[in-house]
Image: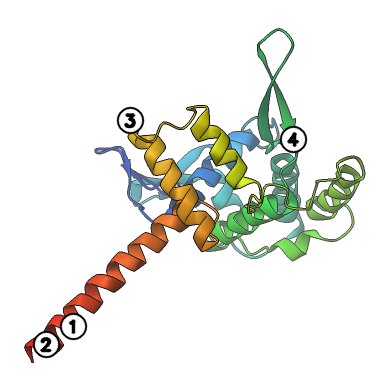
C-alpha cells in the first residue's frame, strides 16, 4: 500500500524519498494535516481516500480531491480557512527553566522568513496536487496572508528581534577568550575526549576560514581533500608522461 502524501512503502515502512527537500516537504505535510485535523470544520479533509476507483490501494487526502481543479469561491474559502488555522497553530515551542528547577514551555511565532519558506513549500506541494491557488491570491483584505502580515506587524511592536533574523549564524568575536577559558577549566578536554577534539578543530578551522558551523567546515575539508587528491593524480600523470 502506497500513501500518496507520505510516499511510504508500508511493507518496508521507510520513506521512498531521500532528497533533503523532499523529506522537508513530507515533514511539513504531516505537520499541516496534523494541525488542521484539530479543526472541526476541516478534520474530514484530512482523511485518506482512494486516489482513483481503479487504484484503491493508492490513497490521497480528501483535502486534495476537494480542492483540485479550477478555482472557485467555495474552494478559496476552504483553503483560506485551512491556512488561517495552520498559521495560528504552527508555532515554535521553546523551553525555559523556572525557579522550581523545572521547565516551562512557551509558544512563539516563527520568524517571518522561516514561516514564509514553509508557506511557499506548502503551496508548491498544493500546486503539484492540482490546487490552482498561489500565495498572492490570499493577500486581499481578510484573507489569511493579509491577516498574517498584520499579526507580524503587531508582534514586531512588542518584540524587537522579530523579523531581524536573530538566529542567523554569526561570527563570535570573543571566540579566542572563550576557547582559552574552556581549555583552562577543562570544559574542553581535547587530549582524552575525541568529541571535544573534533569540536576544537571545527572551531579553529571555522575561525581561520571565516566559516560559521560544522557543516561548512566539513564541506571545506571535503573539497580540500578532493582537490588535493585530484591534483596529486594529475601530477602523477604528468610526471609519468
Image marks 1 and 4: residues in contact by CB distance under 8 Å: no
Q: Provide the secondary structure element on which disc 4 rests.
A: strand
Residue placed under numbered mark 1 in the picture = 235
* Residue furthest to the bottom: 241
Place of residue 168 in the rendered image (x, y in percent of width and height, measured from the top left): 66, 52
Residue placed under numbered mark 3 in the picture = 192
Q: What is the CA distance from the residue labelled 4 to the residue labelled 2?
A: 63 Å
228 or 25: nearer the viewer: 228
The N terminus sits in image quarter: top left
Image marks 1 and 2: residues in contact by CB distance under 8 Å: yes
As drawn, is 14 to the left or to the right of 166? Answer: left
Place of residue 62 in the rendered image (x, y in percent of width and height, measured from the top left): 54, 44
Q: Residues within 10 Å of mark 1 (few under 14, many from 20)?
A: few
Q: Residue at x 67, y 30 (%)?
A: 94
Which is more N-terminal, label 3 or label 1? 3
Which is more N-terminal, label 2 or label 4? 4
Q: What is the CA distance from the residue labelled 1 to the residue labelled 2?
A: 6 Å
Residue placed under numbered mark 2 in the picture = 239
- The label shown at residue 108 is 4
* Residue furthest to the left: 240
Q: Is residue 21 visible?
A: no
Image marks 4 and 2: residues in contact by CB distance under 8 Å: no
Image marks 2 and 3: residues in contact by CB distance under 8 Å: no
Asked if residue 69 is positioned above or below residue 227 in the image, the reply reads above
As drawn, is 49 to the left or to the right of 66? Answer: left
Q: What is the CA distance from the residue labelled 1 to the residue labelled 3?
A: 38 Å
Amino acid at each position: 500500500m502506497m500513501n500518496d502524501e507520505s510516499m511510504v512503502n508500508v511493507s518496508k515502512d521507510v520513506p521512498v524519498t531521500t532528497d533533503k527537500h523532499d523529506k522537508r516537504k513530507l515533514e511539513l505535510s504531516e505537520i499541516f494535516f496534523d494541525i488542521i485535523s484539530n479543526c472541526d470544520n476541516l478534520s474530514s479533509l484530512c482523511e485518506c481516500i482512494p486516489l482513483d476507483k481503479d487504484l484503491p490501494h493508492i490513497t490521497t487526502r480528501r483535502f486534495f480531491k476537494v480542492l483540485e481543479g479550477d478555482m472557485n469561491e467555495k474552494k478559496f474559502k476552504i483553503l483560506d480557512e485551512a491556512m488561517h488555522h495552520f498559521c495560528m497553530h504552527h508555532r515554535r515551542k521553546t523551553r525555559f527553566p523556572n525557579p522550581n528547577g523545572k521547565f516551562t514551555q512557551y509558544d512563539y511565532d516563527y520568524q517571518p522568513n522561516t514561516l514564509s519558506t514553509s508557506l511557499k513549500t506548502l503551496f508548491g506541494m498544493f500546486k503539484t496536487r492540482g490546487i490552482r491557488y498561489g500565495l498572492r491570491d490570499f493577500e486581499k483584505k481578510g484573507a489569511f496572508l493579509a491577516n498574517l502580515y498584520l499579526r507580524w506587524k503587531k508582534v514586531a511592536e512588542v518584540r524587537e528581534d522579530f523579523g531581524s533574523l536573530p538566529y542567523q549564524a554569526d561570527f563570535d568575536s570573543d571566540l579566542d577568550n572563550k576557547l582559552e577559558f574552556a581549555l583552562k577549566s577543562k570544559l574542553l578536554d581535547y587530549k582524552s575526549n575525541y568529541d571535544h577534539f573534533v569540536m576544537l578543530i571545527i572551531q579553529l578551522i571555522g575561525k581561520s576560514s571565516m566559516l560559521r558551523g560544522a557543516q561548512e567546515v566539513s564541506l571545506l575539508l571535503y573539497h580540500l581533500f578532493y582537490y588535493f587528491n585530484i591534483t596529486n593524480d594529475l601530477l602523477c600523470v604528468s610526471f609519468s608522461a
